[in-house]
Image (cartoon, rainbow, N blue to C red):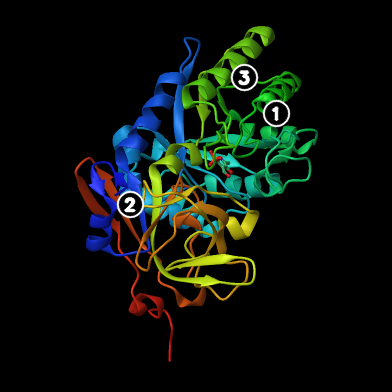
Amino acid sequence: MFKIGNVEVSELKEKYGTPLYIYDENIIKQNINDYKEGFVSKNYNTQIIYASKAFSSLYMYKLVREENIGVDVVSGGELYGVIKEKVDPKNIFFHGNNKGEAEMDMALSYKVKNIIIDNLDELKIWAKKCERIDYDLNLMLRINVGVSAHTHEYIVTAHPDSKFGYYIENDDILESIELIEASKNMKFKGFHFHVGSQIFDMTGFTIAIEKLFGLIKKINRKISYLNLGGGCGVKYTEDDKPLSLIDFSKIIIEKVDSELEKANIKIDKLFIEPGRSLVANAGYQLYTINQMKKALNKTYYFIDGGMNDNIRPALYGALYSVDIANKMDAKKDMEVSIAGKCCESGDVLFKDVKLPKADKDDLLIVYTTGAYGYSMASNYNRLPRPAVVFVDGNNSKLVIKRETYEDLYKNDLD
Ligand SMILES: Cc1ncc(COP(=O)(O)O)c(C=O)c1O
């Protein structure tokens, strides 16, 4: 039987039911430690910021607080969670294109310290609001460096016409810096970029760093902070060959150090913002196989979840590795597709995978589901979102309850 930590997944099924999201807490901590080890320079301070869109929960925010790393939030909902978990406002980095005014007011009322500005229009709203605050806001401008990180089209966020950030060649960058400089409570700290996700080859990333330094030279201002986003790839299938977190970090540090030396400037602090690579390989999904069916050319195993709890295969063709958790040593002599229960023909989560012959009530384990799984889940077909469990060695604890049918209708009025 497959184990997470020291706990057999059959025990987790018995205790919490399926479908189920399960995290190995020690893998998350190891990932954080790897980043802490690799992402250091003798030339400036460094900080890891967890991009919490990958997976947010109060328990995860508590872990982040205890590990004393930063946290990136992009919405009032994520902000509400970090405030509830009493994350230090100095460690909160408020991102997002198209921030709402209510979200901005919420950030200011909690004295969130770091704002990443997406565009000039947004900045003008902050400028107005900042006239009435009693603390300084650290601002970084998000720059679209116009470099693609050579990953899947839907998860590249920095090609020239991306919706995110200031395009590097536009004049509104300088106009924004001047607006910040004219304000009392807004401090221009530097720049941010995020060149894409699931990056295996650092070529695009290092070109992006060079381009950013071109901009730094052009604007001729003191730069205190640089934030180079997230993007480190993870292993979903045998074809994925990710860098270690330490190597990924070191390549960035070396490139920044060399660009700083070339430009003969100093910065105070360098940030990176990993999401996926902090949590993906710590996460698993566990399903029960309900039925098997033979179509004309395909055999299907039907599971008790679907695209509502993992939209990534349907959204952008994401691939995963799977096993039958109670038949780990059995021969994988079947080629099957695993389909969910949603009323969409696209609700085939894992296509043409090799697995042993299944029996009813076998357990399907899916690896590397810790990022953008629960956080992208929906209630399509009024399916309740599964529970989330964290495992720490021999112990498991429920960190998000399974939704009930009652929950699903709690906002409906009759
Ligand atoms: C601004 C920003 N930072 C960090 C991340 C995290 O990226 P990843 O999960 O690939 O590390 C994202 C993801 O989209 C992002 O948009």
Residue lying at 40% horizontally and 24% vertically, measured from the top left: 36
Q: Is residue 226 rendered to the left or right of residue 58? A: right
* Spot occupied by residue 190 in the image (x, y as percentages of width and height): 60, 28
Label 1's element?
Answer: helix
Label 2's element?
Answer: helix
| Count of marks, rendered view | 3
* Spot occupied by residue 100 in the image (x, y as percentages of width and height): 57, 57
* Spot occupied by residue 10 in the image (x, y as percentages of width and height): 27, 56
> Which amino acid does the dot numbered 1 rest on?
Gly
Label 3's element?
Answer: loop
Q: CA distance from mark 1 to mark 2?
A: 34 Å
Q: CA distance from mark 3 to mark 2?
A: 37 Å
> Which amino acid does the dot numbered 3 rest on?
Lys
Q: Is residue 393 rendered to the left or right of residue 296? A: left
Specify whether tag 3 is near ligand 1 (CB below 8 Å).
no
Q: Residue furthest left?
A: 394
* Spot occupied by residue 230 in the image (x, y as percentages of width and height): 55, 35
Discs 3/2, front: 2
Q: Nearer the viewer, residue 385 or 366?
A: 366
Q: Is residue 330 rendered to the left or right of residue 380? A: left
| Between discs 1 and 3, the one toward the N terminus | 1
Discs 1/2, front: 1
The disc at residue 204 is 1
Q: Which residue is identified by label 2?
A: 58
Q: Residues within 10 Å of mark 1 (few under 14, many from 20)?
A: some
Instruction: State which quarter of the image contains the C terminus.
Output: bottom left
| Between discs 1 and 2, the one toward the N terminus | 2
> Which amino acid does the dot numbered 2 rest on?
Leu
Q: Is residue 74 visible?
A: yes
Q: Which residue is identified by label 3?
A: 222
